[in-house]
């Protein structure tokens, strides 16, 4: 199993977009991968949330990492987070 590494760019969005490194790892390890732009890969995973985000209550948080698979590791370029 290859290690997963978040780039500085992706780490910079941890608090801003409200995801955790554990959620990103779980999404990549358990969700189907799909092709994304620029030859990258992506996947999506829904997590129970039941909390407030930016003043509004949401039941679900979806984490969508954009990443590349290299020979020795998976490199996460950025992560999008959706609340609903």
Image (tube, rainbow, N blue to C red):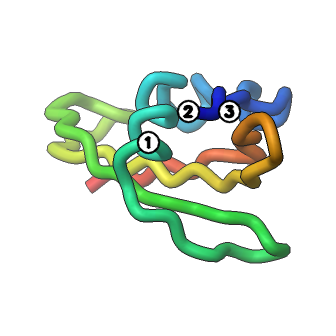
Q: Position of residue 11 (x, y in %)?
A: 72, 26
Mark in front: 3 vs 1: 1
Cα gap from disc 2 to disc 3, whole angstroms: 25 Å
Circle 2 residue: 1
Q: In the rendered structure, which disc, 1 or 2, sits on the residue that comes first in sequence? A: 2
Question: Distance from label 3 to label 1 (Cα)?
Answer: 20 Å
Q: Is residue 80 left or right of residue 31?
A: right
First along the sequence among labels 3 and 1: 3
Residue under pointer 1: 29
Helix or strand or loop: what does disc 3 sit on? loop
The tag on residue 13 is 3
Which quarter of the figure is the C terminus placed in? bottom left
Q: Residue at x 50, y 36 (%)?
A: 24
Crowding near pointer 3: few (<14 within 10 Å), some, many (20+)?
some
Residue at the image position 62 percent from the left and 46 percent from the top: 79
Q: Quadrant of residue 9?
A: top right
């Amino acid at each position: 199993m290859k290690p997963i590494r978040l780039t500085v760019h992706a780490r910079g969005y941890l608090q801003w977009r409200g995801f955790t490194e554990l959620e990103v790892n779980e999404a990549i390890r358990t969700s189907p991968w799909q092709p994304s732009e620029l030859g990258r890969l992506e996947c999506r995973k829904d997590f129970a949330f039941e909390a407030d985000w930016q003043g509004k209550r949401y039941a679900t948080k979806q984490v969508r990492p954009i990443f590349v698979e290299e020979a020795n590791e998976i490199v996460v370029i950025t992560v999008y987070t959706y609340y609903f």
